[in-house]
Image (cartoon, rainbow, N blue to C red):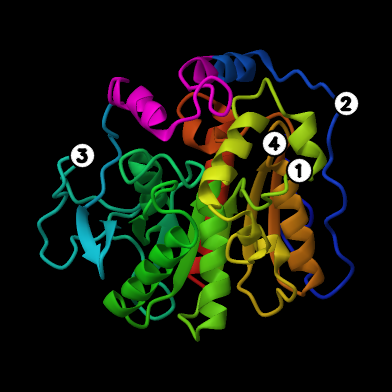
Amino acid sequence: MPVEPNPSEPNPFGPNPFGPAPFGPAPFEPAPEVRHLIDAASSQFPALGSELTDIKDVRAFFAARPAPPASDIEVAHVADEDANGVRVRVYDPTNGADGTGDTNGTGGTDGTGGTDGTGGTDGTGEVPVVVFAHGGGFCLCGLDSHDGFCRAMTVATGAVVVSVGYRLAPEHPFPAAPEDCYTALLWAAKRYPGRRLAVAGDSAGANLAAVMALTAQDRGGPELVCQALYYPMLDPTRHGASHERNAQGYFLTADHVRWYWDRYLADPAHGADPYASPLRRADLSGLPPAHMVTAGLDPLCDDGWAYARALADAGVEVRMTHLPGMFHGFLSMAGALPEAARTRDDAFAALRRALHG
């Protein structure tokens, strides 16, 4: 069952509610249906950092795999666009500017959009916007890999979702990805002026979402109402106990995490930059409310808890959901795990509330 410290009434100005993560005894054996999915996912994923280390071999591994089936989640208007030099995919629960419906051929065309068919409006009478950064360790994945996730987010939140196809490492190491994401954020704010705006991401994308919030604060906007951070990858030093406790056996491994960071940070000194590791930010006050999801079997679990504690200490409102028996990436497997589906529904419902005021 989820563990939610103060989910209904976050206490940003009182004592920090985020103590140590509530872990069970190690090693922890997940439920049989979870173990089955972990093993199935692991069998389809390369041994990064051990058997495979060259990015060309890794990309060839994924290129040789059959393409996953297209999502059957219908969104009224889906189109790839150029956001000032950054490729983005826009999911609009309304018919969009031209009313042409789903234009990239990957999903439905009936224009039903959000849960009420209209997408819903924020306090300004406009449909709100989420700028989303995909996971993949800064090196893998892209707009297609997270198409279904973004469609589900669009339908559940009633918001326009702008998914960012940022440049990948190691060809484009830090700071290419955060700069691309901030460029897309500025583009979205200009494209949809006056609308309530949030950022979101999973894994490495959650790092980039957190950095978008930092950058927006540092560079004078745009104003954000929420940062949704799903099992964020935040600490290149990998000092949290979960990196050792969950090093092997739960899909994402310590070797994977090390391999990702080593390729993202061409200069290890960049790990001290808060735009690479938000945990290094000295002052987190004034940031938008954060919605965090962590998994107890994830090497990155302590990354999320450490950031939740730091945000709460700085007076930032934090909503935390922790799944002790889940693993990294589980929100993308909602079709196979009822608990993942319930947690994703809850996370998107919380984001919808933040977006619609």
Residue at numbered disc 4: 299
Q: Do the CB atoms of the residues marked 1 and 2 lie less than 8 Å apart?
A: no
Magenta run includes residue 163: no
Q: Do the CB atoms of the residues marked 3 and 1 lie less than 8 Å apart?
A: no
Residue interval drawn in magenta: 40-68
**Can residue 92 be seen in this snapshot?**
no
Disc 1 to disc 4, C-alpha distance: 18 Å
How busy is the neighbourhood of tag 2: few (under 14 within 10 Å), some, or many (20 plus)? few
Q: Amino acid at mark 1?
A: Val
Dot placed on the residue nearer the N-terminal end, 3 or 1: 1
How busy is the neighbourhood of tag 3: few (under 14 within 10 Å), some, or many (20 plus)? some
Q: Amino acid at mark 2?
A: Pro
Query: Residue 333, image x and y in percent?
Result: 49, 30
| Residue 117 position by quadrant | bottom left
Query: Residue 123, image x and y in percent?
Result: 44, 78
Query: Residue 122, image x and y in percent?
Result: 41, 73
